[in-house]
Image (cartoon, rainbow, N blue to C red):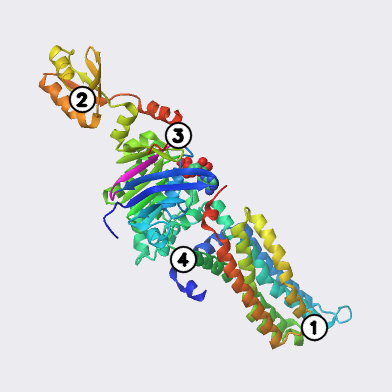
Amino acid sequence: MNAVIARSPVRALARKELGELRRHRMIVATAVVLPVAFLVLPVANLLFYDPARAIGGPDFAVGQAMFCFFLTPVIMPATMAAYGIIGERDQGTLEPLLTLPISDRELLAGKVAAILLPTLSASFAIYLLYMAAVVVVVSEPVRTPALDWSWPFGLLLTGPLLALFSTLTGLVFSARSKDVRVAEHLSGLVLLPSMLPVLLIVTRTVEPSLVAWLGFAAVLSLLDYALWKLALRAFDRERAISTV
Amino acid sequence: MRGAEPAIVCDAVSRCFGERLVLSSLTLAVERGEILGLLGPNGSGKTTTLRILATLLQPHGGSARVLSYDVASETMEVRRRIGVMPERPSLYERQTVEANVRLWADVHGLADPGEAVGRALQFVGLEDRRREPVGSLSKGLKQRVALARAIVHRPPVLLLDEPSSGLDPLAAAAMENLIRGLAGEGTAVLLNTHRLAEAERLCDRVAILREGRLLHLGTPRQVRAALLGHIVEVELAGAVDLPVRRAIESFPAVRETCWAPSAIRVRLTDSERDTPELVARLVSAGARIIAVRPAGDLERAYLELMSQPLPGSLAA
Ligand SMILES: Nc1ncnc2c1ncn2[C@@H]1O[C@H](COP(=O)(O)OP(=O)(O)O)[C@@H](O)[C@H]1O
Ligand SMILES: [Mg+2]
């Protein structure tokens, strides 16, 4: 897919997608409110950590915080991706787009790039801010587990894969639904169970070791590849312009 | 560009939706520099034809080619060479005029997209509105943005779906002039319309469609003659006299005559072929002609054609 993104029609499409996304109030609101909430909650959680009242100890508290950072790249793309194809069809702009010399791969790659960019920027930005807050204001006993190397490593490795997973799921449903909201709900149903591995790691049911992260990343990569193929199949040009 | 066949060719093109045949063995061709109008009521298959040529729909029978490239199997080659204005308003309303046209220039991979956008906007007379969001423009100006977008890569073939529908007469006339200008530069134009007057005014040839079948294809004059039965009205300065009467009665192409004190209505075998000869004969008989015009109410003939029961077999 990298080779496809580097080509200029994809860049032009991605730029146009970003311009469109920026002008949708619902999408901008989600893209702002969600990361802010997912930054404030974990910081507050650790800042006001009280060993006497906390359940599950410091590891559990940090795990709770980390869950927010893994959730962001999964939730943020959902609305944008569900809108991706069906939304553009409803708006009437998909039809002329399909008369341009672009392949299905290029069209989808443009949409994927435009969704990943804000998602990953926000996901990593709030994590950086959180780390800064941990270094500056958070004290023991949660400080040490919060600074454990395996969290930034895991997030950097699996964050983009999770975001891609969510984006492609949304696009598959967007290509096959008759309505943006239906696409959104259906992809939500798929995304929830996909958070199970993350839940296992942040609760330390599975230790956040190198092997665990690599294994998780390998599974996600395979899933993403399969979803990319599925999205290409789900996208049907005649269906995409039909209004009946 | 391959071969010397016309820029647009439909060769017995058919298309179904489910069980329904909405386009039935349509055959037509558009030459470079020619404007061909697809004329027909709603649901007659105009948009379907255009979408097949624009690679949006597959033909289910026959074949269609743009500059000799097959629309079903050589889609990318076709897409590089066509400019399309769809039926529905289809611009990014929240983005500027310039951004809308620029996207097309970029996707076509133009060497100097900025220059191309400037030229296209200048052509449609919108260079001073380039920074305004499309949503703030009138319908007529939006259609011009859509045209600028369709021509930004200077396509040799233009497919326009009802380009002036919903425009006031002034804006529609402006759109017609732009289209004429493009054809004048050698662009092959296929356009859809449901307005007979527009088809007559703008198109070099008109194809009349009904329920997916081609009923007539020819110049507006030929179509008019076909619909109205080749009737010509000649108005004279004075009364119809004997030499004039003789001149007409001796002309073998005259099938039927209707006399008025200072006007004659004749039905000719082929009004396009026979009118010049008729006029010449009248003049040499001493007639002082004020006007010669095709007679009859075209609008009414068209409506009648559209409400007649269709013959069982193909009318192409
Ligand atoms: N995607 C589609 N699915 C089913 N029927 C369609 C579709 N598109 C067009 N039709 C039908 O095909 C016929 C021709 O439509 P169209 O080509 O849009 O006509 P026109 O442009 O002349 O109004 C209509 O009866 C229309 O309902
Ligand atoms: Mg139509």
Residue density around tag 2, few if under 14, some if 14–19, many if 20 or more, within 10 Å = some
Nearer mark to the viewer, of 4 and 1: 4
In the image, the residue with mark 3 has its CB under 8 Å from the nearest atom of ligand 1? no
Q: Where is residue B33 drawn, in percent x and y?
A: 28, 49
Q: Is residue A195 left or right of residue B252?
A: right
Q: At 76% from the left edge and 76% from the top edge, which residue is drawn?
A: A199
Type of the residue with mark 2: Ala
Foreground of the two, B215 or B221: B215
Q: Element at badge 1?
A: helix
Q: Where is residue B72 drawn, in percent x and y?
A: 43, 57
The stretch in magenta equals B31-41
To which residue does mark 2 refer?
A: B253
Q: Is residue B145 visible?
A: no
Q: Which mark is residue A133?
A: none
To which residue does mark 4 refer?
A: A12
Type of the residue with mark 3: Gly
Residue density around tag 1, few if under 14, some if 14–19, many if 20 or more, within 10 Å = some
Q: Element at badge 4?
A: helix
Comes first in the chain, label 2 or label 3 = 2
Give the chain letter at badge 3. Answer: B
Q: At 47% from the left edge and 47% from the top edge, which residue is drawn?
A: B15
Type of the residue with mark 1: Asp
Q: Give the CA distance from mark 4 to mark 1.
A: 45 Å
To which residue does mark 1 refer?
A: A59
Foreground of the two, B275 or B91: B275
